Image (cartoon, rainbow, N blue to C red):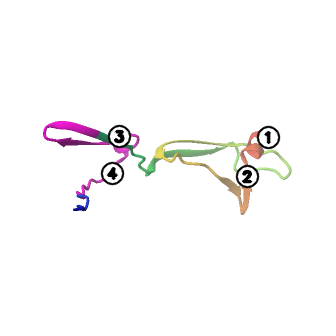
Amino acid sequence: VTRRPTEVKFTFRASKEHDGKVLACKFVQDERLIEWKRENLSVFYKADFDSEVRIIKRKVRWNTTVQFSISYSDVGNPSAKHFCRIGSRPLTDAEVRKC
């Protein structure tokens, strides 16, 4: 006689505190440990974000160098990335460093 496997469903609400934690289940029969099954959890969540853009001068002359800096910190998974542009033209980090 072939028996169908028993399926038990658990639910929990994932939070960022669960990220990187191990989900572990223990299987016991007749008071004896049969085995442990473990899976690492990776929880994706929106960054808690703090950012700032600092520009030295807002009014600049034509054909002069403009400097600005950005700073940001976040706690998120995955980490936030940054993108800067002037109008519709994207700036790369290399262009920003040249200034």
Disc 1 designates what residue?
98
As helix, strand or loop, the secondary structure at mark 3 comes to strand
Write down the residue under mark 2.
Answer: 91
Q: Are marks 2 and 4 in contact (CB under 8 Å)?
A: no
Residue 34: say if magenta. yes
Residue located at (17% from left, 36% from top): 32
Instruction: Tell me which amino acid carries mark 4.
Output: Ala
Callout 2 environment at 10 Å: few (<14), some (14 to 19), or many (20+)? few
Where, by quadrant of the figure, is residue 72 drawn? top right
Q: Earlier in the sequence, mark 1 or mark 4?
A: 4
Quadrant the N terminus occupies: bottom left
- Residue 7: percent from left, percent from top: 25, 58
Q: Which residue is mark 4?
A: 14
Whole-Å distance between the Cαs marked 2 and 4?
37 Å
Q: Residue 81: x and y, percent? A: 59, 48
Mark-to-mark CA distance, 3 and 2 = 41 Å
The CA span between labels 1 and 4 is 43 Å
Q: Which residue is mark 3?
A: 22
| Residue furthest to the left | 30
- Which is more N-terminal, label 2 or label 3? 3
Rendered image: mark on residue 72: none
Q: Secondary structure at mark 1?
A: helix
Q: Nearer the viewer, mark 3 or mark 2?
A: 3
Sequence-first tag of 3 and 4: 4
Magenta region includes residue 13 = yes
Q: Nearer the viewer, mark 3 or mark 1?
A: 3
- Looking at the rendering, the stretch of residues picked out in magenta corresponds to 7-35
Is residue 74 rendered to the left or right of residue 82? left
Disc 1 marks which amino acid? Lys
Is residue 32 toward the left or the right of residue 16 in the image?
left
